[in-house]
C-alpha cells in the first residue's frame, strides 16, 4: 500500500516567526495517524526557514522536510545555489524539482530537472518532481503529451532501486493559485497515464510504489474527492498550506472508511 503524502509548498512566504507559529499550530491540530491510516506530511518552506522548521519537526516520524529547489553540483562556485548535500545537512528528506514557477520564471528545462533528480537520488533526497500543462496546451488537447514529455525528460535513464524514493506531482499550471481545480476524474486520468509511463521506465513493481500527487488549488473542500481516486496518492498544496486549520483539514482528509467510523 502506498502511504499518502500531504505536502505543503509554502513558496516565497512567511517570516521565521510566522513559520514557527504555523508549525506549532499545525502540530496541535493535525493528527495524521488516525487509526490505521498512516499519512506522511512534508513541509517545504523557503530556504531561510529550513533549519528552524526542521528542528520543530524533530522526532515527528511522519513529518518530512522538503526544499523547494536543489542544484545538481555538489559544491563550488555556484553563487546562490544549494546542493543536495547541503539540503541533507539542513535536515531535508525531500526536494521539489521542476515546479512550474521555476520552469516559467527561472527557465528550468527538463534537462535541468534530470540533473536535479539524479543528484537528489544519489544523496538520498526524495525528489518531488512536478509536471503540468498550461491552459493553452490543455485547450489544444495536449495535456497527456506534455506531462509525459516532462516525465520522460526528467526520468528516462535514471536508476531507481525502489519507487518510494520518488514522488511525482501533477500540477496543471492553470489550476495553480487560481481557485480552479482539475476534476477528480480528470486528475485521476492524467495521473494514471503518468503511472503507466513509470511502468514503462522502471517496471511495474516500482511504478506501483511511486506516490503521485495532485496540486493546483487543493483546499479543504476538494481534498476528499481527490483522495478518493485510486491513483491519487496525495496533494501538493500551496495557498491552503499557509493556514494551520486548512492544511490540517487537508492532512486529515476523509475517506469512505473514515466516514463510516
Ligand atoms: P495552490 O495550492 O496555491 O494552487 O498552489 C499549488 C502549487 O503550486 C503547489 O506546488
Image (tube, rainbow, N blue to C red):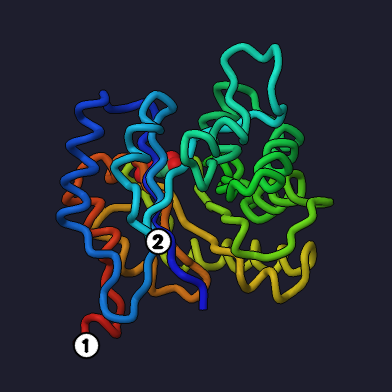
Q: Identify the residue shown where x is 74% and y is 69%.
A: 199
Q: Tell whether circle 1 marks a residue whose Cβ is less than 8 angstroms from ligand 1.
A: no
Q: Tell whether circle 2 marks a residue whose Cβ is less than 8 angstroms from ligand 1.
A: no
Q: Is residue 165 left or right of residue 226?
A: right
Q: Position of residue 234 (x, y in %)?
A: 43, 61
The residue carrying mark 2 is 40
Residue 203 in which image quadrant: bottom right
Which dot, 1 or 2, sits closer to the camera? Answer: 2
The residue carrying mark 1 is 260
Q: Is residue 43 above or below residue 250?
A: above
Q: Position of residue 209 (x, y in %)?
A: 61, 70
Q: Is residue 176 visible?
A: no
Where's ligand 1: which quadrant? top left
Q: Position of residue 119 (x, y in %)?
A: 71, 39
Q: Is residue 73 above or below residue 116?
A: above
Q: Is residue 109 left or right of residue 179?
A: right
Q: Is 143 in front, or is 72?
A: 72
Q: Identify the residue shown where x is 79% and y is 55%.
A: 159
Q: Is residue 157 above or below residue 101?
A: below
Amino acid at each position: 500500500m502506498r502511504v499518502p503524502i500531504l505536502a505543503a509548498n509554502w513558496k516565497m512566504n512567511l517570516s521565521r516567526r510566522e513559520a514557527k507559529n504555523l508549525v506549532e499550530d499545525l502540530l496541535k491540530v493535525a493528527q495524521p495517524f488516525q487509526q490505521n491510516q498512516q499519512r506522511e506530511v512534508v513541509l517545504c518552506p523557503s530556504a531561510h526557514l529550513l533549519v528552524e522548521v526542521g528542528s520543530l519537526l524533530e522526532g515527528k516520524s511522519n513529518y518530512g522536510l522538503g526544499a523547494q529547489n536543489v542544484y545538481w553540483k555538489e559544491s563550488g562556485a555556484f553563487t546562490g545555489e544549494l546542493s543536495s548535500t547541503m539540503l541533507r545537512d539542513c535536515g531535508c528528506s525531500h526536494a521539489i524539482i521542476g515546479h512550474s514557477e521555476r520552469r516559467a520564471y527561472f527557465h528550468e528545462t527538463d534537462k535541468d530537472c534530470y540533473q536535479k533528480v539524479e543528484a537528489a537520488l544519489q544523496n538520498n533526497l526524495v525528489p518531488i518532481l512536478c509536471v503540468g500543462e498550461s491552459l493553452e496546451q490543455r485547450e489544444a488537447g495536449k495535456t497527456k503529451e506534455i506531462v509525459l514529455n516532462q516525465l520522460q525528460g526528467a526520468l528516462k535513464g535514471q536508476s531507481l532501486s525502489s519507487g518510494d524514493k520518488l514522488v511525482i506531482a501533477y500540477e496543471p499550471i492553470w489550476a495553480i493559485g487560481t481557485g480552479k481545480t482539475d476534476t477528480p476524474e480528470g486528475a485521476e486520468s492524467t495521473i494514471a497515464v503518468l503511472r503507466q509511463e513509470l511502468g514503462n521506465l522502471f517496471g511495474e513493481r516500482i511504478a506501483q510504489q511511486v506516490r503521485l500527487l495532485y496540486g493546483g488549488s487543493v483546499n479543504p473542500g476538494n481534498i476528499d474527492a481527490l483522495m478518493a481516486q485510486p491513483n491519487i496518492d496525495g496533494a501538493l498544496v500551496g495557498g491552503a498550506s499557509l493556514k494551520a486549520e486548512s492544511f490540517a483539514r487537508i492532512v486529515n482528509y476523509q475517506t469512505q472508511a473514515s466516514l463510516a467510523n
